[in-house]
Amino acid sequence: MITAPVSTTPTRTTLYQRSVAHYWDSEHNAVNVALGEIDGLHHHHYGIGEADLTVLDAPEAVREARINTELHRLEQAQADLLADHLGPVTADDWLFDAGCGHGAGSLVAHSRFGCHVDGVTLSPVQQQAATHYAERLGAGEQVTFHTADMLSTGLRTGAYTASWNNESDMYVDLDDLFAEHARLLKRGGRYVAITGVINDLHGMASRSVSRINWHYECDVHKRGAFFKALARHRLAVTTVIDLTHAALPYWRLRERSSHLATGIEADFLAAYQEGSFQYMLIAADRI
Ligand SMILES: C[S@@+](CC[C@H](N)C(=O)[O-])C[C@H]1O[C@@H](n2cnc3c(N)ncnc32)[C@H](O)[C@@H]1O
């Protein structure tokens, strides 16, 4: 098996990145922990698709479990949609998961394609947990997680058939990010992002978007800036899907799930409904 060399210490860690690493090292929200325990896939992103709101009326004894299962199903749908857009991938291919969290996206891709995956996160705690989850699911040989900066990974140039950011681009400069994806991807490789972006038509960050930035210690990008930065780095857009409408049921259910809500639900709903914020899937070919 070819192993991908990676520097274990981020080479350009800023104070901001250390703070982000600390955030994710210490993050143990039930919405991530309890849902991950359902099947070993610990998604750290939101969900899409129609929700079955009848789970809210389930008998007390099973209500929390039913809500967890329903939200997890919506998160899984998002991970599946991302995998749908990675293009043709074979078991011999390598994929790169930028800002991998607890590695669920890497594990979803591996289970679908049988491929190799390298995931990077700034958080050593996440990296260790993700490695444990991969081993538990029998994927530890082919799916490897690293504590590294996605802007300078040390991974092999031109070795990757596809790469992605699932809700992790808002922690970094887009030019630095896409330069690294463009370096890692083969010519003809596919880049996919699922992300929240400011609607340029609205203008600057709205109050709700500013609260989302504050809550997660991040800085969401404008939609237009995202496309311009892709083009500057030989990433030619092939697919754009506006998922804003499809994202609402997840937030509505989560807002009414007192054991899972983190307090940011109303801001996501307001931002999407007022039109200041959009949830997007964007795919591009490395040309
Ligand atoms: C919202 S979580 C998304 C996790 C994962 N993509 C998922 O969908 O489950 C954001 C992730 O981005 C990672 N991250 C933020 N900045 C990073 C950087 N510069 N390099 C590597 N990972 C980074 C965090 O450590 C965290 O794992």
Image (cartoon, rainbow, N blue to C red):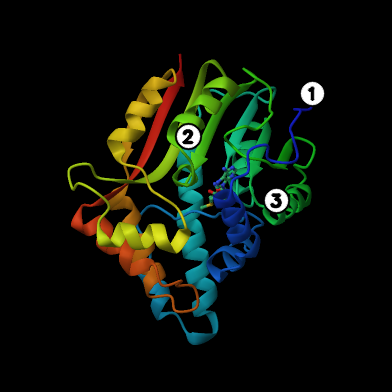
Query: Please, what secondary structure does the residue beneath circle 2 have?
Result: helix
Q: Amino acid at mark 3?
A: Ala
Q: Quadrant of residue 255?
A: bottom left
Q: Look at the picture and state if 14 lies above or below 30.
A: above
> Disc 2 beta carbon < 8 A from ligand 1?
no
| Residues at circles 1 and 3 in contact by the CB criterion of under 8 Å | no
* Cα distance in 3D space between marks 1 and 2: 26 Å
The disc at residue 2 is 1
The image shows residue 79 at horizontal and vertical percentages of 51, 45
Query: For mark 2, what is the residue?
Result: 84
Quarter of the image containing the C terminus?
Answer: top left
Query: Please, what secondary structure does the residue beneath circle 1 have?
Result: loop
The one nearer the camera, 155 or 172, is 172
The image shows residue 53 at horizontal and vertical percentages of 36, 69
Query: Please, what secondary structure does the residue beneath circle 3 have?
Result: helix
Q: Residue at x 53, y 67 (%)?
A: 31
